[in-house]
Amino acid sequence: MALELFYWPGVQGRGEFVRLALEEAGVEYIEMGAGNETQGRGVPSITHWLDGAEVERPPFAPPFLRVGDRVIGQSALILMWIGEHYGLAPKDEPSRLWTHQVQLTIADAVVEAHESHHPVSAGLYSEDQRAEAQRRAIDFREARIPKFLRWFETLMARNPAGPQFLIGDALTYADLSLFQLVEGLSFAYPKATARALAECPKVVALHAAVAARPRIKAYLESGRRIAFSEGGIFRHYPELDA
Amino acid sequence: MALELFYWPGVQGRGEFVRLALEEAGVEYIEMGAGNETQGRGVPSITHWLDGAEVERPPFAPPFLRVGDRVIGQSALILMWIGEHYGLAPKDEPSRLWTHQVQLTIADAVVEAHESHHPVSAGLYSEDQRAEAQRRAIDFREARIPKFLRWFETLMARNPAGPQFLIGDALTYADLSLFQLVEGLSFAYPKATARALAECPKVVALHAAVAARPRIKAYLESGRRIAFSEGGIFRHYPELDA
């Protein structure tokens, strides 16, 4: 049975981190949020799991993944599950947990990327908090982007199996998520991200290697990859970059 | 060998979620950040793991827990590890992952509690971002606190084992963390939190039950429990509450 991915239609958002792992794993999955309501898909299929009175374990928010009779939420947890079931995570327990730890730190960076244009409220339009975002973006682009990217560079430099991947000698879901983080930051803050990446050659190489993997390349060139936009987590407002 | 907990001294912060689990489990642990530098403790013992050139897997930030030759970071992951090793998590895999999912959502609420007084930058003093915080706090106290607390109430109401705990019929680390979240929100936003809790009797009962557990009660009454303050995640600025 195909897995069912639930995420708001039309934006990459946090769903994209899950999609990249499913695409690399070659797993069949259904985009429930994008489907037709007459087929039991679309936004009502998402709100059913969030708000339905009969759902025993409702997720707090999308994305979530339906696997048989279970619904798994929280991007980093979904990825841990996919990684362990589809060969995108190390086998030994310390490395398995370490991969999750790296992913949780990527998730922290994603939160900050979103906060940088929505520092007041996710419920307000970004135009209504631009003054606050102007202040916040300075710290994000000058301090936080470099700090996060340098940390990933350090992990690769110290990986005993070599600097090709974040962890061990094979691709993990964390590598795929770092690819997406670099994609997103490069879209939203092209100047600041290019400056930070100039000091992170291993991260740049990993980003290129992920983009060239056959299944990821096919996905990125397909119509399934949604374009970045000012409706997602990573938003390009030129006045916030420098 | 005692576990070693690394967290900035003098504040509860995210370290407190880990401490509560260690206290309830009755595990011996050393507060490395609070110790004496001549004994290899204190802040330098933290920065050693963050910045030391020879650390293969450096955590991005405290708290982290040293277990033999491993260092585990990210609060939710530390708690998952403690839960599984010291009987504070369910045994079956779906419930084990669901407990982690609940914990990750508590962690999201903790991020938002911090952002509510630091919407511009964690690197600036809160007084230098009070205008932005005034705007953000409205959304946090009116929309987010009720939404998070209602979600926990719903989980307890739908727990097939009864409404005593968030998951199953025994205490988990998520219950301890929800206790701490309620403690922190009640300190920082007493009016808004009391309003939200008035509609969440099961959360209120769980908070009281956790506080009354012998080991937690002893810990809360001991000198080891650091007081809430305006240096932590949960800060009481009366002008932000209503």
Image (spheres, coloured by chain):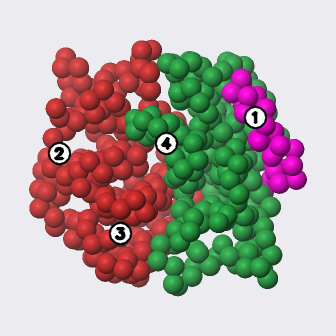
Chain colours: A red, B green
Q: Which residue is mark 3?
A: A167
The residue positioned farthest toward the bottom in the image shown: B53
Q: Are marks 2 and 3 on the same chain?
A: yes
The disc placed on residue B100 is: 4
Residue visible at 34% across and 30% down in the picture: A70
Q: Quadrant of residue A186?
A: bottom left
Q: Which residue is mark 1?
A: B213
Inspect this view and state whether residue B216 appears.
Answer: yes
Kind of residue at badge 1: Arg
Residue A71 lies, in percent from the top left, at 35, 31
Q: Earlier in the sequence, mark 1 or mark 4?
A: 4
Q: Is residue B52 left or right of residue A8?
A: right
Residue B158 lies, in percent from the top left, at 51, 19
Inspect this view and state whether residue B109 appears.
Answer: no
Q: Is residue B214 left or right of residue A239?
A: right
Between B233 and A97, the residue placed more toward the observer is A97
Q: Residues within 10 Å of mark 1 (few under 14, many from 20)?
A: few
Residue visible at 42% across and 36% down in the picture: B92
Q: Which residue is mark 2?
A: A27
> Closer to us: mark 1 or mark 4?
1
**Real-space CA distance between mark 2 and mark 3, rounded to the nearest whole angstrom:** 22 Å
Q: Are marks 2 and 3 in contact (CB under 8 Å)?
A: no
**Real-space CA distance between mark 4 and mark 2, rounded to the nearest whole angstrom:** 24 Å
Q: Report in which chain the residue with disc 2 lies.
A: A
Q: Report in which chain the residue with disc 4 lies.
A: B
